Image (spheres, grey):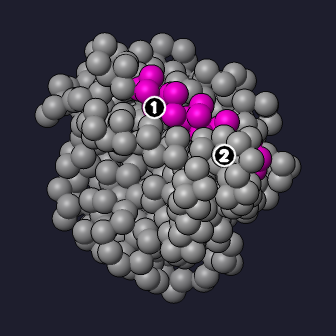
Amino acid sequence: MAWLALSVVVIWAGMLAFRDGFWLADQRDDTVPVDLARWPSVVAVVPARDEAAVVGRAVASLVAQDYPGEFRVILVDDNSDDGTAFVARIAADGDPRLTVLTGGPLPHGWTGKLWALSQGIEQAGSPDYLWLTDADIAHAPDTLRTLAGMAAPRQLALVSLMARLQCRTFAEKLLVPAFVLFFQMLFPFRAVNRPGRVAAAAGGCMFVDAAALARAGGIGAVRGAIIDDCALGELLKRQGPIRLALTRRSLSLRDYGRIGEIGAMISRSAYAQLRYSPLLLAGTLVGLTLVFLLPPLLTLAGQIGGVIAWLLMALSFQPMLRFYGQSPLWGIALPLIAAIYGWYTLVSALQVWRGRGGQWKGRSQALLQP
């Protein structure tokens, strides 16, 4: 048993030392926006389906952007039946920069969000940049300045900011900071932000070089992707450098009052991340057990190596907990949190096997084929 405890310590020490500092949460948008000689033209495209509860704040934050360049907003109403378009128009208060577009029927082989984005991009014309942002994200007034100031001087094909998620309820405190930590374990931001094969993005806020997207084949090149943001990040990194960062400027408006609601978000795409592979699913569950669940079990068995591995695990969580303003004691709960994520990953596979995978807004979108 001692050798097993030593193995887990080595795994955690290796990840902390050699996994591109995924746990440091140091890739941020904290730089002051620069003054550009020419501010590029930008069109924000917002896909929205049954988002009346939040779209007003999102649209109001867009039309309130302090941006010196040409800027318009296109909201694509994806067959909502809750008055989403009406709420969006009211929130804009007559601002002529907002266009509300009624989306067409969903074609075979497309996910709903990407089809809505495609229609908005077609309507946008020929701006320098496209700001692809969700209907449940509110942005600080300087967000667009920041995005343009990061992208234009460096000729980045994509700048993506990971919106700060709500972290008020027990369920959110338990699962939300870990969601971002686990994302960074899969896609270390430092690796994303340097040349190489690692690519990712955060779908709530993606600032895209329109010419680079056109060269890559347009949004249709990823039309069936469930994890559309990472698919777009991979597509655009082939066209030029990209950047992914944490932010406090963009805030998710979606509340999760229960663990099951966050679980539904996890299960929607977890098995897709594993490429619908039973082998990768089994490997993931075994890996979660070895890396996260074994340390507390070894601790209970009196193995000092289990204690050390558990402490290293808790240490890895601290920067993200500070970013979200949460108690450092949540670090001790990371094995339990990982077990919950493992369960919902299994649920994700079960949903796909039952033909109900990729559920979002009444649509089952897993395993789509063009």
Magenta span includes 273: no
Which one is in front, 38 or 105?
105
Q: Quick check: 137 left or right of 18?
A: right
Q: Which SS does the magenta portion mostly show?
A: helix
| Badge 1 element | helix
C-alpha span from label 2 to label 1: 24 Å
What are the residue bounds of the magenta stretch?
Answer: 331-348
Residue type, label 2: Leu
Quadrant (top left, top right, bottom left, bottom right) of the C terminus: top left
Q: Residue at x 46, y 46 (%)?
A: 287
- Residue wearing tag 2: 298
**Residue 249 seen from this side:** no
Number of other residues with Cα within 10 Å of mark 2, as a class: few under 14, some 14 to 19, many 20 or more: many
Q: Quick check: 42 left or right of 291?
A: left
Check the image and name the residue furthest to the left: 370
Q: Residue at x 55, y 66 (%)?
A: 10
249 lies above or below 370 = below
Among numbered discs 2 and 1, the one appearing first in the sequence: 2
Q: Quadrant of residue 217?
A: bottom left
Which one is in front, 57 or 15?
15
121 lies above or below 367 = below
Q: Quadrant of residue 59?
A: top right
| Badge 2 element | helix
Magenta span includes 335: yes
- Residue wearing tag 1: 345
- The spot of residue 322 in percent (x, y) is 79, 58
